[in-house]
Amino acid sequence: MQQSAVPELAHTHTSPIQWVATATAIAGVVAFSSVLQPDPATAAQAAGPGAKPAQASAAAPDPSGVAFPIECGPTKVLVQKKASGDLDGDGRPETVAVVRCDAGSGTPPNGVYVLTQAADEAKPRVVATLVDPKDRLSVTDFALSDGAVTATLLGYSSPDVPSCCPDVKDLAKWQWTNGAFVRSTPAGAQGV
């Protein structure tokens, strides 16, 4: 066997300290690269020549301070639940709010309202009433998904039923269709 004319190089054999140094250097590069990220991309495009780009993500309307069409007398209006999403497909989110009077006792009826807010408007406004408080309904299991609002509505079979004890349960779904919110029964719903 013939010996190599070149002596063995020291760097061809690694030691534990070299592995630690390499791991530390790689961790430093990864940490530094996470700080230097590009700005998030937006999918907003101009509508045509000379048009301004659409907003990539508009804020959903905030229901606090909105004048809801509900009569509460001396008590305040209480927003119990809210959910936001694009219900009409215009690219801007709407907010659906479940509200009632902030009564000290009893079960005051709910109202369900759809809010919108244009970019040039200072405050959100009510554009649709899905449940009118005059119908004496309580709203449970409220959700907004895939452009539809769903809720369980608890009501009364007659005016003689005390407001503490609803005896009718109904499942409802509202979806924007041909310029209006259309109510239907969700698929798979069973009557009670």
Image (spheres, rainbow, N blue to C red):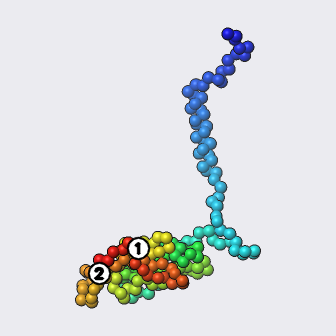
Label 2 Cα neighbours within 10 Å, binned few <14 / some 14-19 / many ≥20: some
Q: Quadrant of the N terminus?
A: top right
Q: Is residue 11 above or below residue 96?
A: above
Picture coordinates of residue 45, whole percent (x, y) = 68, 69
Picture coordinates of residue 178, whole percent (x, y) = 54, 83
Taking the view exactly as shown, the residue that stands out farthest to the right is: 49
* Mark 2 or mark 1, whichever is nearer to me: 1
Question: How far apart are the two marked residues, 2 and 1, measured between alpha carbons?
Answer: 19 Å
What's under tag 1, amino acid-wise? Answer: Ala
Q: Which mark is residue 168?
A: 2
Q: Is residue 135 above or below residue 6?
A: below
Given residues 191 and 67, the one toward you in this image is 191
What's under tag 2, amino acid-wise? Answer: Val
Label 1 Cα neighbours within 10 Å, binned few <14 / some 14-19 / many ≥20: few
The picture quadrant where one finds residue 91 is: bottom right
**Secondary structure category for the residue under label 2:** strand
| Total marks placed | 2
Q: Which mark is residue 187?
A: 1
Can residue 81 be spotted in the picture? no
Picture coordinates of residue 24, whole percent (x, y) = 58, 36
